[in-house]
């Protein structure tokens, strides 16, 4: 189970429980809406449809909470209370950062699974700390609901995994060192990289990861499937795949040394990806400008 970023607040009333539950469901809806819109903007309708399904699932959860609130609070006028101090629970897990062509339905449902697991952990903690029996029972009910959601998303994830694997070309995906080595070559192939201190810094970080990896015992291998040709040709895409790999590693690793390595690698690649995307946008603007000038001649 994933860990929470912060200790949940102690909820003392049914109103606080229900308001918190509704807020968490709405936060998930808003997160998936943003990811859906990004997929539409990037002309990825299949992935937009996956996030549409997740939006529908979370909207159904929200309606259940609202119905429960209507049943529970209508007989008693709820007192005005300050909303619980709750850190953001929804985590896009890099899906809002990496190039869309590196995403698939499996990754989308994996994000959903871990967010539902975090919600289960949250409500389990709230139940354990509840100061009143009715609050404890309500939190336990929410925990059971979230556990059911976990089971649903896990089934969806398994189905997506088998469909993706069935469509994958034969052959093994390269190991992480080979991917990092190729990424280093791509960075050094960028025009003017020798005079760009930022790109030189990213190259040095990549080389350091390559040197460190042999001493690490990773539990997972990167999932590339049919993306390999695309990944090895574009530094932005390969950077996104490496970032995705290390983000996944952070969610499944228990070894502290590997977890620290994956966290540092992800942090480096987030910065690198932002820089590469800026370079891509700059080149595309220049290409458009040159094309416009040529058309005017």
Image (cartoon, grey):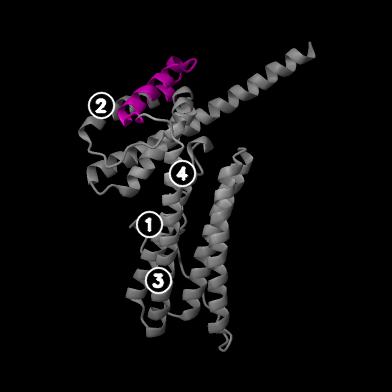
Q: Identify the residue under disc 3.
A: 144
Task: Say if 205 sits above or below 94 in the image.
Answer: above
Of the residues under marks 1 and 3, which one precedes in the sequence?
1
Real-space Cα separation, disc 1 to disc 4, in angstroms: 33 Å
- Residue 5 has which mark? 1
Disc 4 secondary structure class: helix
In the image, which is nearer the foreground, mark 4 or mark 2? Answer: 4
Q: Is residue 110 magenta?
A: no
Q: Magenta: predominant secondary structure element?
A: helix
Residue bearing the label numbered 2 = 211
Q: Earlier in the sequence, mark 1 or mark 4?
A: 1
Query: Which label belongs to residue 110?
Result: none
Q: Which residues are magenta?
A: 172-201
Q: Residue furthest left?
A: 215
For image coordinates 39% across by 69% down, the residue present is 123
The label nearer to you, 1 versus 3, is 3
How many neighbours does mark 4 have within 10 angstroms: few (below 14), some (14-19), or many (20 or more)? few
Q: Residue at x 55, y 53 (%)?
A: 32
Q: Nearer the viewer, residue 63 or 153?
A: 153
Q: Position of residue 38 (x, y in %)?
A: 59, 43
Q: Residue drawn at (28%, 44%), measured in percent from left and top? A: 259
Instruction: Report how far apart the C-alphas of labels 1 and 2 lie in the structure.
Output: 31 Å
> Taking 99 as reference, is 125 above or below it?
below
Q: Give me the C-alpha separation between circle 1 and circle 3.
A: 21 Å
Q: Quadrant of the C terminus?
A: top right
- In whole angstroms, how far apart are the C-alphas of marks 4 and 2? 35 Å
Disc 4 designates what residue?
Answer: 163
| Residue contact at pointers 1 and 2, CB within 8 angstroms | no
Horizontal placement of 172 versus 294: left or right? Answer: left
Q: Nearer the viewer, residue 220 or 262?
A: 220
Q: Is residue 155 above or below residue 272?
A: below
Residue 102 location, x and y as percent? 48, 36
């Amino acid at each position: 189970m994933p860990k929470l970023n912060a200790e949940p607040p102690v909820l003392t009333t049914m109103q606080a429980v229900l308001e918190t539950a509704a807020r968490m469901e709405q936060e998930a809806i808003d997160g998936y809406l943003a990811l859906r819109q990004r997929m539409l903007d990037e002309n990825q309708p299949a992935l937009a449809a996956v996030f549409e399904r997740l939006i529908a699932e979370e909207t159904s959860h929200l309606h259940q909470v609202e119905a429960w609130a209507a049943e529970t609070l209508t007989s008693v006028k709820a007192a005005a209370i300050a909303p619980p101090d709750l850190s953001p629970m929804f985590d896009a897990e890099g899906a809002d950062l990496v190039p869309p062509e590196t995403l698939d339905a499996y990754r989308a449902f994996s994000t959903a699974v871990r967010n539902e697991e975090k919600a289960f952990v949250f409500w389990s903690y709230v139940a354990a700390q509840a100061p009143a029996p009715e609050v404890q029972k309500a939190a336990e009910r929410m925990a059971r609901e979230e556990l059911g959601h976990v089971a649903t998303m896990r089934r969806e994830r398994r189905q997506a995994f088998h469909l993706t694997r069935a469509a994958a070309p034969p052959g093994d995906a390269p190991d992480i060192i080979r991917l990092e080595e190729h990424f280093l070559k791509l960075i050094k192939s960028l025009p003017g990289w020798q005079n760009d201190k930022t790109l030189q810094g990213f190259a040095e970080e990549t080389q350091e990861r390559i040197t460190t990896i042999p001493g690490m015992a990773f539990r997972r291998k990167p999932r590339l499937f049919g993306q390999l040709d695309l990944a090895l040709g574009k530094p932005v895409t390969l950077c996104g795949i490496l970032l995705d790999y290390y983000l996944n590693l952070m969610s499944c690793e228990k070894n502290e040394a590997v977890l620290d390595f994956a966290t540092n690698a992800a942090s480096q690649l987030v910065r690198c990806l932002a820089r590469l995307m800026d370079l891509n946008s700059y080149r595309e603007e220049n290409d458009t400008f040159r094309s416009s000038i040529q058309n005017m001649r």
